[in-house]
Image (tube, helix red, strand yellow):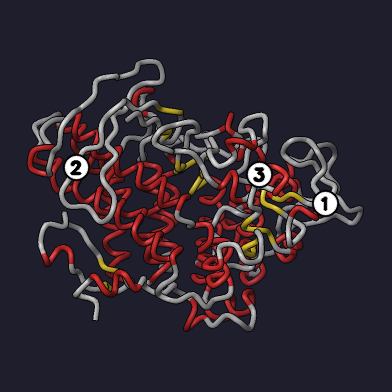
Amino acid sequence: MKYIVKIMSKKINLSSIRVIRLIPLLAIAWLLVTFTSCTDFLTEELQGDFNSETFYQNDKQALQAINGAYNAIAFTSFNNAIWVFGDVASDDAVKGGNPGDQAEITFIDEFNADANNGIINNYWIFAYEAISRANNVIAYVPEIPMKEELKTRIIGEARFLRAYSYFNLVNIFGKVPLKLLPQLSQTTIHVPLSEVSAIYHQIEEDLSYAVQVLPESYGSPDLGRATRGSALGLLGKACLYQGKWAEAISYFQQLESSGQYELLDDYASNFKVEFENSKESVFEVQHLTGQNPFTGNVLNQWFAPPGEGGYYFNAPTQALVDAFEISANGEADPRLDASIGRDGQPWLNGEPFSASWSPTGYLTKKHQQPLSEVPSSLKGDGDLNYIYMRYADILLMKAEAFNELGKADSALINLNKVRKRARDSYQGTIPSDLLADITTINQNQIREAVRNERRVELAQEFHRFFDLMRWGKTVAEAALGPDFSYDQNRYQPLPQAEIDANQAIP
């Protein structure tokens, strides 16, 4: 079957290849693919069945295996609802859609999901599928006779993808089984829950390896793979989540010193197809429309209004809209209308948005494309990538870490870079009372400014709930209201299917 996908930086065409049976995997057969350049296409098909002993024989198969791990990441990030955990569970969005549609998302939205929730179970399955594929690469590729530079790079990519998967799992579920080996025996299949600290330790170990072996960038045949900057950014983020401020700053500074990353001139450009994999993108999950098997972005339909054949889920709240600055004469932070459809303002196709399209009066603009790019008949097969980490996020994390260390001046430099880009994105002469630089040196005031800046800069990019949780009980409970208990609702319940299947979980 033909599989074409995009993996960071450019759309990359992957060769036609039959599904290969690898033993064992969690739930889904490997979809193995071969990278090609944007102009050269491989048409040779691998035929027959392989197991883990006969498959890993050469560099072509090593590349196919790591490509399968990227494929799993794409499914985990989108088709299995990380947006539900990051946005809908937060104060930035509600489920949206028809009241009775996707009731299991409502349970997560209302903090009463149980272990049998299908959204939770699906995410778990796909996350561990990505880990299983990465583990196979890490275990088997070292024995392949091939160029050492390519070998170590592929292993570095696999360790980055494993760290990425565990970072999301530990922040959604807390304690999870730390599976690091191919699942060939009872001891590697039935793995007990690990402490959160142990999972973070493994994340840091994997990313530290990736930092040492991944390149700063790639030539055209390999554009789209995880880079050294991707690993440094996630490593810094992992340290930030643990309150390791100085270490986080060090990794962010190493990322910056590469010279690979800058803010785009216009904020809204980050969410348009023509600017995919830009200089602002640190790590980006890739999608391509019109492929068999499917590789598109389903959120183009899930978040769209009903008039476009959409389901209008992940509806922004009034609280999120109110977090954006509005000048005395009613002019808004330009990031508001770049992020959220609101009544009377231009929608993606040029027509005015109507509050009647959404139960909250708002819809997210991010992750959607105009009908000129993806018509309503193909709405669920979008072409737009998801930027998991942008350089703006790096700057705000760096500002936060500097502030927690009491270094107000350094914190403000990074914070105000993000605000300046927002000012520069304003069309016309910006009002003097809109998006002015933050000048206070009070640590608490800077902390609040950074937190609100994260909320508006990264609105509807699936980070808000995780930010609230890492900021602690007081902040989270104040934001999420009386229905939320930090002690009871910080983590989602482990899927009942895993509890039943994994004999090491009591």
Tell me: residue 464, above or below residue 59.
Answer: below
Q: Where does label 2 land, which residue?
A: 21
Residue 404 falls left or right of residue 268: left
Give SS at disc 2: loop
Residue 373 falls left or right of residue 278: right
On the image, the x and y values in percent for residue 156 come to 26, 43
Q: Where does label 3 land, which residue?
A: 309
Q: Quadrant of the C terminus?
A: bottom left
Residue type indicated by callout 3: Gly
Q: Nearer the viewer, residue 70 or 388?
A: 70
Say which of marks 2 and 1 sits in front.
2
Dots 2, 1 in contact, CB < 8 A:
no
Label 2 vs 1, first from the N-terminus: 2
Give SS at disc 3: loop
Q: Which mark is residue 313?
A: none
Say which of marks 3 and 1 sits in front.
3
Residue 18 falls left or right of residue 280: left
Residue 96 in which image quadrant? bottom right
- Quick one: label 1, few (<14), some, or many (20+) residues within 10 Å? some
Residue at 34% across / 42% down in the picture? 70
Label 3 to label 2: alpha-carbon separation: 37 Å
Residue type indicated by callout 1: Asp
Q: Where does label 1 land, which residue?
A: 343
